[in-house]
Amino acid sequence: MRAALAIVLATLSFGAWAGGTAFACRYEGLVDEGSGKYLLTLHAIEDPDVRVSFVPNRRLVLHIQHSVRNPLPSGFPPVSAQEFNAAIVRIRADLNTGAVTRFGVMGSALREMKGQTGHYRVYGLRLEDEKDPEKPDAPLVVYAY
């Protein structure tokens, strides 16, 4: 009985961490606010599969910082500083080219900022391989955690 209960609890906890969604967007600005904090503005080309509110013209403003809190406010384990920095480098590269890219959200990673429509707090970023069999050479996608 205990073994069965342990398996069920493990399955539920992995299910809570599983699942994410990515959507097409164009990065419009990344401001380094110092102390590992960034302000990312992006224009959503596709609707995310998560409930969000936008600032005018389908823009999201993400207040991003690296946190080692375990778990993160989203319920996920923290990402490493190296993973976070690699995601910031990727955002800067996409911003410099102006290309359409994809941004991903794991679970409840976008933490709504009260009183600021379209503004969200994010405590971790990581590059993820979406493993799309139809696009085996697709670039890694920045995901919020």
Image (cartoon, rainbow, N blue to C red):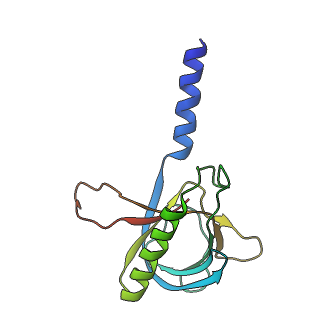
- Between 24 and 17, the residue placed more toward the observer is 17
Q: Is residue 96 above or below residue 81?
A: below
Residue lying at the far right of the rendered structure: 115
Q: Quadrant of the C terminus?
A: bottom right
Q: Quadrant of residue 62?
A: bottom right
User: Looking at the picture, how far across and down is residue 119, in whole percent?
Assistant: 66, 75
Q: Toward the viewer: 62 or 30?
A: 30
Counting every numbered tag in the picture gives 0
**Which of the 4 image quarters holds residue 135?**
bottom left
Q: Name the residue at 24% across, 54% down.
A: 133
**Residue at position x 63%, y 54% from top?**
74
| Residue 62, above or below 105 | below
Q: Is residue 18 above or below residue 144?
A: above
User: What is the x, y in percent for residue 126?
Assistant: 48, 62
As displayed, is residue 40 above or below residue 50? below
Q: Could you say which quadrant of the image residue 2 lies in?
A: top right
Residue shown at the point (36%, 87%) measured from the top left? 97
Q: Residue furthest top?
A: 1
Q: In front here: 13 or 90?
A: 90
Q: Position of residue 65 (x, y in %)?
A: 63, 70
Q: Position of residue 46 (x, y in %)?
A: 43, 72
Q: Quadrant of the N terminus?
A: top right
Q: Residue at x 68, y 54 (%)?
A: 69
